[in-house]
Image: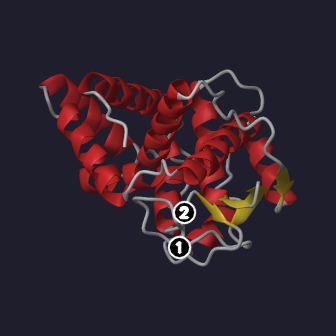
């Protein structure tokens, strides 16, 4: 598998930390208390999750509580995304289907919330959909070419990112602020959140980019990926609340 230099890896974690820090700085104070007896699926369906004061930390927490893959094959009973170790997305948990992949409501909401807080996108849900289309296209390409990272590679990369983040006092303090504002602890962030929802897609994108450069091929951009809306009401409500 292609190697990633420490400098490049460090630039990636800096970008992730800056983005997450921007999100936490822009997030409104928590305006409600989630019902702890609700399941993650029920919370996702409820108006509470979609409320105007939903924080990115709450979106991240619900994503973890769902124990659901970001996306998975519509025909799979188990996810094949390295590092996740989670169950496949069921049609009840899916917001979209993109090229045969069910996209979980929690993952779409999390990505859309990131765009809503850190960019000038007029439609953060559409922007999140475009990002996920690209992720699916790269994932399918990587799977076809044998470029998917292994579980060990994902966890090793997460460990290296943690070491880089702890390499000096300033980086560690920034990392702690980000993790705490996401409502997570260090173990959850580096051992669960990153290996499920960030690092697999980082490594896939890097592997695909290197392969395409070596073989003089165009990078898959997701523009041709077919999208089917599974839960139109959920999408509409999410768009409305994230305006």
**SS at mark 1?**
loop
Q: Which residue is mark 1?
A: 87
Instruction: In the rendered view, tell whether residue 180 sits above or below residue 211.
Output: below
Position above or below: 89 against 11: below
Instruction: Confirm or deny contact between disc 2 and disc 1 (CB under 8 A).
Output: yes
Q: Earlier in the sequence, mark 2 or mark 1?
A: 2
Which residue is rendered at x = 47% and y = 30% of the image? 210
Q: Is residue 53 visible?
A: no
Q: Separation of disc 2 and disc 1 at Cα?
A: 6 Å
Q: Residues within 10 Å of mark 1 (few under 14, many from 20)?
A: some
What secondary structure is found at the residue carrying circle 2?
Answer: loop
Which residue is at a point 33% across and 43% down the rendered structure image? 179
Where residue 22 appears, as percent x and y from the top left, is: 46, 26
Front in this rendered view, residue 50 or 154: 154
Residue at label 2? 69
Q: Is residue 67 left or right of residue 89?
A: left
* Quarter location, residue 91: bottom right
């Amino acid at each position: 598998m292609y190697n990633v230099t420490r400098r490049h890896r460090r630039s990636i974690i800096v970008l992730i930390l800056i983005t997450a820090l921007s999100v936490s700085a822009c997030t409104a104070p928590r305006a409600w208390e989630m019902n702890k007896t609700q399941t993650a699926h029920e919370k996702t369906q409820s108006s509470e999750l979609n409320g105007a004061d939903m924080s990115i930390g709450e979106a991240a927490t619900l994503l973890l509580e769902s124990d659901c893959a970001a996306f998975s094959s519509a025909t799979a009973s188990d996810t094949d995304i390295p590092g996740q170790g989670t169950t496949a997305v069921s049609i009840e948990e899916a917001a979209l289907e993109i090229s045969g992949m069910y996209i979980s409501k929690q993952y779409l909401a999390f990505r859309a919330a990131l765009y809503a807080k850190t960019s000038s996108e007029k439609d953060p849900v559409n922007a999140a959909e475009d990002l996920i289309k690209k992720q699916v296209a790269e994932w399918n390409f990587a799977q076809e070419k044998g470029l998917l990272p292994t579980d060990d590679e994902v966890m090793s990369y997460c460990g290296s990112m943690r070491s880089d983040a702890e390499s000096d006092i300033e980086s560690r303090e920034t990392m702690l602020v980000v993790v705490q504002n996401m409502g997570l602890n260090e173990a959850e962030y580096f051992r669960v959140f990153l290996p499920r929802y960030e690092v697999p897609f980082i490594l896939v994108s890097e592997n695909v980019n290197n392969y395409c450069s070596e073989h003089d091929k165009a990078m898959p951009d997701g523009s041709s990926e077919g999208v089917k809306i599974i839960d139109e009401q959920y999408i509409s409500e999410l768009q409305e609340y994230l305006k």
